[in-house]
Image (cartoon, grey):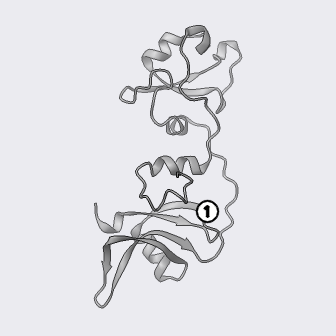
Amino acid sequence: MSLIRQKVLVLNSSYEPLSVCDAQKAILLLFGGKAVPVTHHPERFICTVTETYPMPSIVRLTVFVRVPYKRIMLNRKNIIRRDAFQCQYCGKTDAPLTIDHIIPRSRGGEDSWENLITACRRCNSKKGSRTPREAGMPIMKQPQRPNHLMFMQQLTATAAEDWKPYLYMT
Protein backbone atom coordinates (compact mmCIF):
# COMPACT_ATOMS: atom_id res chain seq x y z
CA MET A 1 0.00 0.00 0.00
CA SER A 2 1.24 3.45 -0.87
CA LEU A 3 2.26 5.55 2.13
CA ILE A 4 -0.14 8.28 1.07
CA ARG A 5 -3.03 5.76 1.28
CA GLN A 6 -2.29 4.87 4.91
CA LYS A 7 -5.31 5.40 7.17
CA VAL A 8 -5.32 8.23 9.71
CA LEU A 9 -7.79 8.71 12.57
CA VAL A 10 -9.34 12.19 12.67
CA LEU A 11 -10.42 13.51 16.07
CA ASN A 12 -12.54 16.54 16.83
CA SER A 13 -10.88 19.27 18.91
CA SER A 14 -12.57 17.59 21.92
CA TYR A 15 -10.68 14.35 21.10
CA GLU A 16 -13.82 12.46 20.08
CA PRO A 17 -13.38 10.32 16.94
CA LEU A 18 -14.89 11.84 13.80
CA SER A 19 -13.68 9.78 10.89
CA VAL A 20 -10.87 7.90 9.21
CA CYS A 21 -9.17 9.40 6.19
CA ASP A 22 -6.10 8.64 4.12
CA ALA A 23 -2.72 10.20 4.91
CA GLN A 24 -2.95 12.57 1.95
CA LYS A 25 -6.08 14.23 3.37
CA ALA A 26 -4.54 14.31 6.86
CA ILE A 27 -1.39 15.99 5.52
CA LEU A 28 -3.51 18.63 3.80
CA LEU A 29 -5.31 19.26 7.10
CA LEU A 30 -1.97 19.59 8.92
CA PHE A 31 -0.32 21.92 6.39
CA GLY A 32 -3.51 23.97 6.11
CA GLY A 33 -3.45 24.57 9.87
CA LYS A 34 -6.80 22.86 10.32
CA ALA A 35 -5.37 19.99 12.37
CA VAL A 36 -2.46 19.17 14.63
CA PRO A 37 -0.72 15.81 14.91
CA VAL A 38 -1.51 13.68 17.97
CA THR A 39 0.64 10.65 17.17
CA HIS A 40 2.68 9.52 14.20
CA HIS A 41 4.06 6.31 12.76
CA PRO A 42 7.56 5.87 14.25
CA GLU A 43 9.19 4.49 11.09
CA ARG A 44 7.29 6.26 8.31
CA PHE A 45 8.07 9.70 6.98
CA ILE A 46 6.93 12.11 4.31
CA CYS A 47 9.80 13.70 2.46
CA THR A 48 9.65 16.96 0.58
CA VAL A 49 12.52 18.56 -1.28
CA THR A 50 13.76 20.32 1.86
CA GLU A 51 12.06 18.68 4.86
CA THR A 52 11.14 15.32 6.35
CA TYR A 53 7.95 14.99 8.39
CA PRO A 54 6.68 12.05 10.44
CA MET A 55 3.66 10.24 8.89
CA PRO A 56 0.59 11.07 11.01
CA SER A 57 -1.38 8.26 12.63
CA ILE A 58 -3.88 10.45 14.51
CA VAL A 59 -4.70 14.11 13.88
CA ARG A 60 -6.92 16.44 15.91
CA LEU A 61 -8.87 19.30 14.37
CA THR A 62 -7.97 22.73 15.76
CA VAL A 63 -11.57 24.00 15.65
CA PHE A 64 -14.52 22.09 17.12
CA VAL A 65 -16.80 20.74 14.40
CA ARG A 66 -20.41 20.32 15.46
CA VAL A 67 -21.59 17.07 13.95
CA PRO A 68 -25.35 16.66 13.78
CA TYR A 69 -26.58 13.39 15.21
CA LYS A 70 -26.53 10.98 12.32
CA ARG A 71 -28.99 8.16 12.30
CA ILE A 72 -27.58 5.18 10.50
CA MET A 73 -29.99 4.05 7.80
CA LEU A 74 -31.64 0.67 8.21
CA ASN A 75 -30.62 -1.23 5.10
CA ARG A 76 -29.17 -4.59 4.14
CA LYS A 77 -25.59 -3.34 3.87
CA ASN A 78 -25.64 -1.75 7.35
CA ILE A 79 -27.26 -4.79 8.98
CA ILE A 80 -24.53 -7.00 7.53
CA ARG A 81 -21.86 -4.54 8.71
CA ARG A 82 -23.39 -4.36 12.21
CA ASP A 83 -23.36 -8.16 12.44
CA ALA A 84 -19.71 -8.28 11.30
CA PHE A 85 -20.46 -10.22 8.07
CA GLN A 86 -21.39 -13.27 10.15
CA CYS A 87 -24.42 -15.56 10.42
CA GLN A 88 -25.93 -14.82 13.82
CA TYR A 89 -27.06 -18.43 14.27
CA CYS A 90 -24.07 -20.58 13.25
CA GLY A 91 -21.28 -18.00 13.05
CA LYS A 92 -20.27 -18.69 9.45
CA THR A 93 -18.52 -15.86 7.67
CA ASP A 94 -17.82 -17.57 4.34
CA ALA A 95 -21.41 -18.25 3.23
CA PRO A 96 -23.71 -15.81 1.38
CA LEU A 97 -25.80 -13.91 3.92
CA THR A 98 -29.50 -13.15 3.99
CA ILE A 99 -31.50 -10.91 6.31
CA ASP A 100 -33.72 -12.73 8.80
CA HIS A 101 -36.60 -11.41 10.92
CA ILE A 102 -36.24 -12.67 14.51
CA ILE A 103 -40.00 -12.37 14.92
CA PRO A 104 -41.24 -13.38 11.46
CA ARG A 105 -43.28 -10.93 9.42
CA SER A 106 -46.09 -13.47 9.34
CA ARG A 107 -46.35 -13.00 13.12
CA GLY A 108 -46.23 -9.22 13.08
CA GLY A 109 -42.45 -8.80 13.10
CA GLU A 110 -41.33 -5.42 11.85
CA ASP A 111 -38.35 -4.11 9.95
CA SER A 112 -36.25 -2.67 12.78
CA TRP A 113 -32.67 -2.81 14.02
CA GLU A 114 -33.80 -4.96 16.95
CA ASN A 115 -35.68 -7.49 14.78
CA LEU A 116 -33.35 -7.98 11.80
CA ILE A 117 -30.16 -10.05 11.79
CA THR A 118 -27.90 -11.72 9.25
CA ALA A 119 -28.22 -15.43 8.60
CA CYS A 120 -26.71 -17.82 6.11
CA ARG A 121 -29.21 -19.35 3.68
CA ARG A 122 -29.09 -22.71 5.43
CA CYS A 123 -29.92 -21.26 8.88
CA ASN A 124 -32.58 -18.93 7.47
CA SER A 125 -34.31 -21.86 5.76
CA LYS A 126 -33.99 -24.05 8.86
CA LYS A 127 -35.56 -21.37 11.08
CA GLY A 128 -38.39 -20.71 8.61
CA SER A 129 -41.40 -18.84 10.03
CA ARG A 130 -40.57 -19.65 13.63
CA THR A 131 -38.89 -17.64 16.35
CA PRO A 132 -35.31 -18.59 17.24
CA ARG A 133 -36.56 -20.15 20.50
CA GLU A 134 -39.13 -22.31 18.68
CA ALA A 135 -36.51 -23.39 16.16
CA GLY A 136 -33.93 -24.13 18.88
CA MET A 137 -31.51 -21.68 17.28
CA PRO A 138 -30.13 -19.16 19.77
CA ILE A 139 -28.85 -15.84 18.45
CA MET A 140 -25.13 -15.19 18.98
CA LYS A 141 -25.52 -11.48 19.80
CA GLN A 142 -28.71 -9.56 20.57
CA PRO A 143 -29.23 -7.03 17.75
CA GLN A 144 -29.28 -3.32 18.53
CA ARG A 145 -29.25 -0.01 16.71
CA PRO A 146 -25.64 0.80 15.74
CA ASN A 147 -23.95 4.17 16.07
CA HIS A 148 -21.17 5.68 13.97
CA LEU A 149 -18.54 4.75 16.58
CA MET A 150 -19.51 1.07 16.32
CA PHE A 151 -18.89 1.17 12.56
CA MET A 152 -15.59 3.01 13.02
CA GLN A 153 -14.45 0.31 15.44
CA GLN A 154 -15.29 -2.36 12.86
CA LEU A 155 -13.57 -0.44 10.10
CA THR A 156 -10.48 -0.29 12.25
CA ALA A 157 -10.60 -3.81 13.66
CA THR A 158 -6.89 -4.01 13.00
CA ALA A 159 -6.39 -0.51 14.36
CA ALA A 160 -3.01 0.65 15.46
CA GLU A 161 -2.54 0.44 19.21
CA ASP A 162 -2.43 4.23 19.47
CA TRP A 163 -5.98 4.50 18.01
CA LYS A 164 -7.64 2.18 20.52
CA PRO A 165 -8.03 4.61 23.46
CA TYR A 166 -9.75 7.12 21.17
CA LEU A 167 -12.12 4.47 19.80
CA TYR A 168 -12.92 3.16 23.29
CA MET A 169 -11.40 -0.21 22.42
CA THR A 170 -9.08 -0.65 25.44
Q: Residue at x 60, y 27 (%)?
A: 116
Asked whether, in this view, residue 19 is left or right of residue 90, the answer is right
Mark 1 closeness class: few <14, some 14–19, many ≥20 residues within 10 Å: some
Q: Nearer the viewer, residue 74 or 139?
A: 139
User: Which quarter of the rendering shows the N terminus?
Assistant: bottom left
The kind of secondary structure element at disc 1 is loop
Asked whether, in this view, residue 163 is left or right of residue 53, the answer is right
- Residue 122 placed where, x, y %? 43, 15
Q: Residue at x 57, y 61 (%)?
A: 18
- Residue 75 placed where, x, y %? 57, 36
Q: Quadrant of residue 50?
A: bottom left
- Residue 20 placed where, x, y %? 49, 60
Q: Nearer the viewer, residue 99 or 47?
A: 47
Asked whether, in this view, residue 64 is left or right of residue 88, the answer is right
Q: Quadrant of residue 132?
A: top right
Above/below status of 31 relative to 11: below
Residue closest to the far bottom: 50
Task: Name the kind of residue labelled 1 in the image.
Answer: Glu
Above/below status of 47 relative to 12: below
Q: Residue at x 55, y 72 (%)?
A: 60
Which residue position is annotated with label 1? 16
Task: Please give the count of numbered marks on the rendered protein.
Answer: 1
Above/below status of 123 relative to 38: above
Q: Residue at x 52, y 66 (%)?
A: 10
Residue closest to the far front: 170
